[in-house]
Amino acid sequence: MSGFDETPAPGDLERLLGYRFRSPDLLARALTHASHGGEHNERLEFLGDAVLGLAVAETLYHGRPEATEGALTRRRARLVSSRALASAARRLGLDQRLRVGGGFDRSTAEAPLADALEAVVAAVFLDGGWDEARRFVHRLLGPDLAAADPGAEDRDPKTRLQEWAQARRLPPPSYVVLAREGPSHAPRFVVRCSVGPDVPQQSAEGGSRREAEQRAAAACLHWLERS
């Protein structure tokens, strides 16, 4: 076996999670992959998926009273996708704390990381109840859940993209002018936007540098929403 073969030290990790466990064994089980052997996190993952989905659905329901069922369903799906949850798990350092068996590749373990995070949600729920689990989910997905507030999508694309990057502790988006064409009274700017290592660079043009930047940021947001 490889990985962490002892119960994770509660203090450091619990500070990151923002929750202190009465039963640390629950946390240890949540961070034990089936490949490690013994008692693992698959049952906790099953429960955590439901708790997480309910907490997110409740927030979206109250935060977006104008949204249709379809819009709420799509937004919830993005928030609880394997990609989003794995990213949140890495922010907490769970990729280095997940106890696994030999041959497990941590660098490509998106689904197991997402599952482990769901298991941690279940562990908080079993240890502290619904209110603690809901608070944990809000801390975990706070910036993304905040985007569910009414009027959030009315903010300009550059602001929304910067908030997305900040939520993932990434550097701010960068904008590079690729070209400036046309006469001074009717210029055309071409701008490239870059944000994070996993998002393809997007280019757009506009009648001003600001307009081109906004359109390039909107293109990045569009890619993120569809990925």
Image: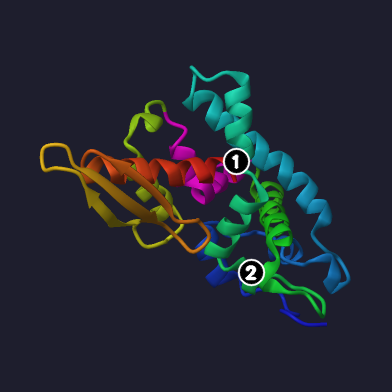
Badge 1 vs badge 2, beta-carbon distance below 8 Å: no
Magenta part of the chain: 130-149
Tell me where residue 42 appears, x and y as whole percent.
82, 56
* 192 in the magenta segment: no
Q: Which residue is mark 2?
A: 95
Is 136 left, or right, of 25 in this rendering?
A: left
Amino acid found under the numbered disc labelled 2: Asp
Quick one: SS at disc 2? helix
Is residue 160 among what the camera can see?
no
Residue farthest along the right direction in this orientation: 38
* 141 in the magenta segment: yes
Q: Which residue is mark 1?
A: 78
Q: Nearer the viewer, residue 72 or 135?
A: 72
Q: Residue at x 52, y 45 (%)?
A: 223
Tell me where residue 64 appears, x and y as whole percent.
48, 24
Is 185 left, or right, of 194 in this rendering?
A: left
